[in-house]
Amino acid sequence: MGNVDILVLDFGSQFTQLIARRLREFGIYAEIVPYFEKIEAIRSRKPKGIILSGGPASVYEEDAYKPNTEIFNLGLPILGICYGMQYLMDYFDGKVEKALAHEYGKANLDIVSECELFKDCKDGEIVWMSHGDRVEVLGKGFQAVAKSLNSPYAAVQNKEKKIYAVQFHPEVAHSKEGGKYLFNFAHNICGANPEWNMKNFAQNEIKKLAQIAADGKVLCGVSGGVDSSVVATLLYRAIGDRLVPVFVDHGLLRAGEREAVEKMFAQNLGVPLVVVDASELFLDRLAGVCDPETKRKIIGETFIEVFEREAKKYNTNGEIKYLAQGTLYPDVIESVSVKGPSKTIKSHHNVGGLPEWMKFELIEPLRELFKDEVRALGRELGMPEEMLMRHPFPGPGLAIRIMGEVNKVDLDLLRKADVIFLDELNRSGYYDKVWQAFCVLLNVRSVGVMGDNRTYDNTICVRAVEAIDGMSATFAHLPHQLLENISNRIINEVEGINRVVYDITSKPPGTIEWE
Ligand code: XMP
């Protein structure tokens, strides 16, 4: 792992990822590690400063998270945020207690003393508070530099030791100048330069990949989604025709999906995309299967079987040495999260179940990036906008959007409705405003009347959600007029559908997909 400008020690706040995001927006490269990261590991990254994140615990509790105190001997500037501040005050012999009045939401920050954190920032700006404890007595050597209505110590500093702390959350968007405060810490106090941008990242990564995969072929599964397409493009720039991109068409794709991927590859990459049409095989195996988890399992296993068969063709003399994957930074952080691994709600199909001979060396060029950074990278690489702005699409495809058994007739019905829904969203400008939008075939029949005839047909459920990362989501408040257009068009244009319903469930308690 390479050098990093700012290292963020994570104490479990739901906002920790945002600290790195904000800093990167300002060109400062930041990464997150758990609060218990070993001091040698911290030192080896050569950070110019350390940020202690917020966290849900109280510092005076017996089992409160505490970092290795060696961090104070590294000679680096430190910024504590919320819990991070309370830890610092506690460590330097101050006092933290349960606040009489909890402070959640907006507050105005009054700067009371000169501080590098607030250089060139407006006084009285809104910051976002979220704390139940507060500092009653400052740590030794600290002075208050800003206050809010309920926090006399909203920001403090020990200039000599270069230790700073804020009670509010500068990383959240509601803190108007929060990004600037973080930037000031990194730049003015730590001396980090804003040199992180996608142009540099792309150039460095291409060089790095060329060195890592200096010989042999790289196998890359392509799904049509943003991540794997960006990985393939990056690799192509690095190693040219030693890239073997494989796209398995499992027959569960949306209308035009396969053609779009083929077109993107033909126009942007000079290597042939290996397209495997395995739709018959998948549909055969799914015949008669209704249980959601069994469907997922069959699709996952069949996928690996097909992928393996194809990979063998390109490895007759052991040419393949690497497997490329589109792992993103949130997955990396999640796997080392201080909160521990989360419970499996649905089994996602990924390459975890690959056979032994295919356990090639892994290449994960996006493992330092957030989703929107991947899009920016794709843009830097000249990839088409419609590919970059695509909604996520689940590995098991439309199979988990058809309730019960999956068959060709139902798949076609669903595809037709889906095309109309997406068309209406694109026309109204709502496609880019939502995280995901799709149709679900409920396999519930109802009585209707069309013309003078009684109908007894299928129901389509329309689902659109807003989300930041898909971990939680709210149903999108689409205008009624738009919903009406969608409903009219689906019923008029798709034979076999006589009813359209809109899903008004958020996540939790629902999941985004229906199965
Ligand atoms: P749920 O339904 O769990 O979905 O709320 C969260 C996000 O994950 C996507 N999803 C999948 N993605 N393989 C994937 O690559 C899968 O098996 C899978 N299942 C769900 C879903 O579309 C949403 O964006």
Image (cartoon, rainbow, N blue to C red):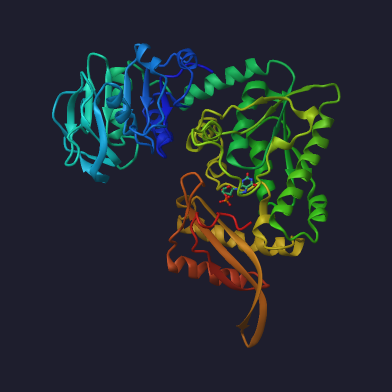
Q: Nearer the viewer, residue 71 or 479?
A: 71
Residue 39 is situated, as x and y percent measured from the top left of the image, at 46, 15
Q: In this picture, is 417 found above or below 42?
A: below
Q: Nearer the viewer, residue 288 or 414?
A: 288
Image quadrant where residue 263 sits: top right
Q: Residue furthest bottom?
A: 452
Judging depth in this view, the residue of 271 and 22 nearest the camera is: 22
* Residue at figure coordinates x 37%, y 31% from the top left: 53
Q: Position of residue 207 (x, y in %)?
A: 58, 17
At x 61%, y 31%, the residue is 231
Position of residue 328 measured from the top left corner of the image (x, y, whole percent): 55, 34
Q: Relative to 480, is 199 above or below?
A: above
Tell me, yes or no, if residue 255 can be seen here: no
Location of the N terminus by quadrant is: top right
Which quadrant is the C terminus positioned in? bottom right
Q: Percent from the top left, x then y, of residue 457?
A: 67, 76
Q: For the view shown, which residue lies furthest in the left direction?
A: 112
Question: Measuring 58% from the left and 65% from the top, which residue is drawn there?
Answer: 461
Quarter of the image where one finds residue 59: top left
Against 106, residue 454 (above or below) is below
Q: How many marks?
A: 0
Viewer-nearest residue: 449 or 263: 449
- Judge from the rendering whether residue 88 lies leftward or rightward of residue 479; answer left or right: left
Give the answer, above or below, for where 71 lies relative to 450. above
Q: Along the horizontal axis of the image, is 271 left or right of 97?
A: right
The quadrant where residue 240 appears: top right
Whether residue 34 is visible here, answered yes or no, is yes
